[in-house]
Image (spheres, grey):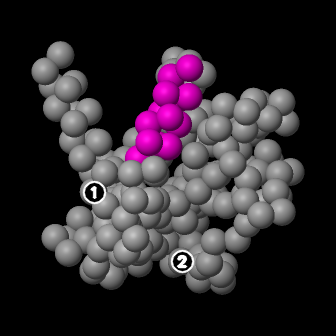
Amino acid sequence: MTAGRPQRGVIGIGAVLALLRPEFPDVTISKIRFLEAEGLVRPARTASGYRQFSAADVERLRFVLSAQRDRYLPLKVIREQLDAVPVDSTAVSRAELLAQTGFSADQLTQLERDGLLRPGPGGRFTTDDITALRTIRTMTGLGVEREHLRAVRAAADHEVVLLKSFSDPETVRELAGLFTSLHTLLVNAGLRQS
């Protein structure tokens, strides 16, 4: 666990729970904290101690929970398997992305047209793209429509424009984490009022 500033593309423990719950209904915040205490995931920490999970952290948690549920593996064996895998985020091809997310080629093309998926150099994708597609699948399963997803993309683009107006990369990373936190707080406050 490392203390420091929030990094770009990270989410809090509540958002991690929301991403994992559709696939693992029994997962709780306590379970995620337990897996962290066991060294199976190592989220970064803000200066004030808040956990900041990357897309790779979420994928590690998904791997651990799947191994426990589907193969009944003990944590020691799961840890050994994780330690054997390189920790750096590797890019995947379009075919690998389709295989890992269950989207069809046509659905992927539509998401690219809508600006919800943007391949990197050489048409490759990252673990963030995998996590984004799984999030989109969960959201659409709950009734979110394409136009709603495009609105989320537009809001993210506006945020990117604002963040690019700052020249210091550390400031940009810190602000990106703060924007995410503020957005979550504002949504929660709005829901409490309705």
Name the secondary structure under disc 2.
Answer: helix
Q: Nearer the viewer, residue 28 or 131?
A: 131
The kind of residue tagged 1 is: Leu
Of the two numbered discs 1 and 2 on the same chain, state the one appearing first in sequence.
2
Q: Nearer the viewer, residue 146 or 142?
A: 146
Magenta residues, start to end: 147-159
Left or right for 70, reference 112: left
Which residue shows up at 69% across the image and 48% down it?
118
Task: Estimate how packed mark 2 is, as few (under 14), some (14 to 19) or many (20 or more) residues with alpha carbons within 10 Å.
Answer: some
The residue that disc 1 covers is 178
The percent coordinates of residue 150 (x first, y second) are 56, 28
The percent coordinates of residue 48 (x first, y second) are 16, 70
Residue 150 lies in the magenta-colored region: yes
Of the 4 image quadrants, the one containing the N terminus is bottom left
The kind of residue tagged 2 is: Arg
Q: Nearer the viewer, residue 120 or 11?
A: 120
Give the dominant element type of the magenta stretch: helix, strand or loop. helix
